Amino acid sequence: MEDLLKYEKKLYKEGINRIAGVDEVGRGPLVGPVVAAAVILPKNYKLDGLTDSKKLSEKKRELFYDILVKDAIAIGIGEVSAKKIDEVNIYQASKLAMIEAIQNLKVKPEHILIDAMPLELEVPTTSIIHGDALSLSIAAASVIAKVTRDRMMIELHKKYPQYHFDEHKGYPTKVHLECLKKYGPLENYRFTYKPVRDLIDKGGEVENEKNREKQTI
């Protein structure tokens, strides 16, 4: 835990206490938004076991999510749609989601710790490679963002269970690619992503929501 507060403690010594960790999830999926979270934790906050969301089980992420929502000073969420991702590319969309998450914080941070990506903001920032495994604030943001997006995909699954979004969360697994080939892409797929683009190029069609719901099992 001491190591995960290394960046925060350095800032505390400089008199900076409102530190926001920022991270995003959802660069790889073929469908849905990219989601970012910004989290301001209490000074010297500790939560044993909290780390990069990718290293945690779904059960652990859900547990930590509930704890963080209760304990955090402020949480901001940002999301950028698949349509916008297609317009500006996933890198720029990730930046936009992070900026939106920061803007949605109800408490203004004095410093922002960001996982890898540089952002030009009025508030001082530090970009940390693999920050979600090195900073507790960023790890908290990664968990909030991951659980938020996963819950979006579970809601999408309820509408279109034949795509099994609750299992793969939109990532291009074998099951997902088979479903995509069988049923075609929904309107909120990312059409610039190769598996979706290739399907369209081969003559696949995008059906509207009404028709797609008729296929719901």
Image (cartoon, rainbow, N blue to C red):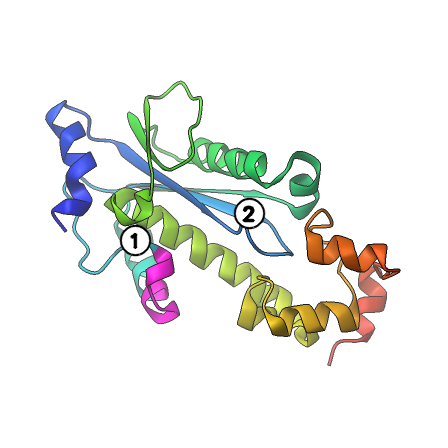
Mark 1 or mark 2, which is nearer to you?
2
Quarter of the figure with residue 215: bottom right
Q: Nearer the viewer, residue 41 or 132?
A: 132
Mark before the other along the chain sequence, 1 or 2: 2
Is residue 28 positioned above or below 93 on the image?
below
Question: Which residue in the protein does label 2 denote?
Answer: 34
Which type of secondary structure does the marked residue at label 2 adopt?
A: strand
Q: Position of residue 34 (x, y in %)?
A: 55, 47
Task: Please tell me which residue is depicted at 76% across the width and 69% down the height of the picture.
Answer: 181
- Left or right, 143 with respect to 173, comes to left
Q: Position of residue 25 (x, y in %)?
A: 47, 50
If the image is split into quadrants, where does the C terminus sit?
bottom right
Q: Nearer the viewer, residue 73 or 170?
A: 170
Secondary structure that dominates the magenta span? helix
- Asked if one can make out residue 189 in the rendered structure from this viewpoint, the answer is no
Amino acid bearing label 1: Leu
Which type of secondary structure does the marked residue at label 1 adopt?
A: helix
Residue 59 magenta: yes
Residue bounds of the magenta highlight = 53-62
How crowded pointer 1 is (Cα within 10 Å; few <14, some 14-19, many 20+) is rated as many
Task: Please tell me which residue is depicted at 80% across the width and 68% down the height of the picture.
Answer: 212
Residue 4 magenta: no
- Asked if one can make out residue 214 in the rendered structure from this viewpoint, the answer is yes
Cα–Cα gap, marks 1 and 2: 21 Å
Question: Which residue in the protein does label 1 denote?
Answer: 68
Task: Please tell me which residue is depicted at 51% across the width and 34% down the height of the picture.
Answer: 95
Residue that extends furthest to the right in the rendered view of this protein: 203
Amino acid bearing label 2: Val
